[in-house]
Amino acid sequence: MSVTFPFGLPQNQNFSQFIYYPNFLNSGEIDMVRGLWKRNQEMEAKLSSGEEGFDDALRKTKVAFIEPQKDNHWLYEKLGSLAIKCNQERYGFDILGFHYNLQLAKYGEGDFFNWHLDFGVGPISNRKLSISVQLSDPSEYEGGELQFMINDDIINAPKEKGTVIIFPSFIMHRVTPITKGTRQSIVAWIAGPPYR
């Protein structure tokens, strides 16, 4: 093995810490997705790490999962196709498909998710791309900014209703505390073989 590099390796000139697609879901589609939220199926969000559990100092929000069914297959298809396109254009990761079912997240007043990675040891070591879909209009809540830590800069993601944000799962990010109203989103992860 050579100790000098790069040695003719292909380089990615299109990499970006996050990509966003405005108006990806229209208002009718958003209403259908928001209608999938069932109060009797909601739960406190766990941490997805080597030791799954609850940590109110890191994360406080409610979630529910969208089981793949005939009436929501269109959503899996639409988000999956976008993830493939984004990966081809920007990242070139080796991906296979969704990692777990799509997750609906609901942030009420005081809810947040502090700085974290979606990638790590054990169950989350196969995550390659993270997806966040804004289901709430910015007028429905205050706070709740999806933010990325890019070097020493904190960057806010767009929060317009219907916008999809895709980013590598190893990018540091957070959702700031909600100070008023409710923020709803879809969260999903695209997985693949371990990096090598």
Image (cartoon, rainbow, N blue to C red):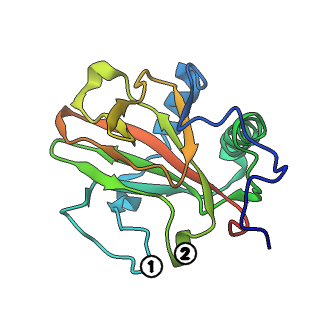
95 relative position to 189: left or right: right
Mark 2 vs 1, N-terminal side? 1
Which residue type does callout 2 highlight? Pro
Residue placed most toward the observer, 6 or 76: 6
Q: Residue at 68%, 54% (x, y): give it.
A: 69
Pointer 2: residues within 10 angstroms few (<14), some, or many (20+)? Answer: some
Residue placed most toward the observer, 173 or 71: 173
Spot the residue most to the right.
8
Disc sitting over residue 50 in the figure? 1
Disc sitting over residue 137 in the figure? none
107 relative position to 65: left or right: left
Q: Position of residue 96 (x, y in %)?
A: 77, 59
Q: Residue at 40%, 25% (x, y): give it.
A: 159
Identify the residue under disc 2.
123
Residue placed most toward the observer, 89 or 135: 89
Q: Position of residue 143 (x, y in %)?
A: 22, 32
Compared to residue 146, the image places residue 195 above or below, namely: below
Q: Position of residue 21 (x, y in %)?
A: 59, 25
Compared to residue 145, the image places residue 126 above or below, namely: below
Q: Quadrant of residue 167?
A: top right
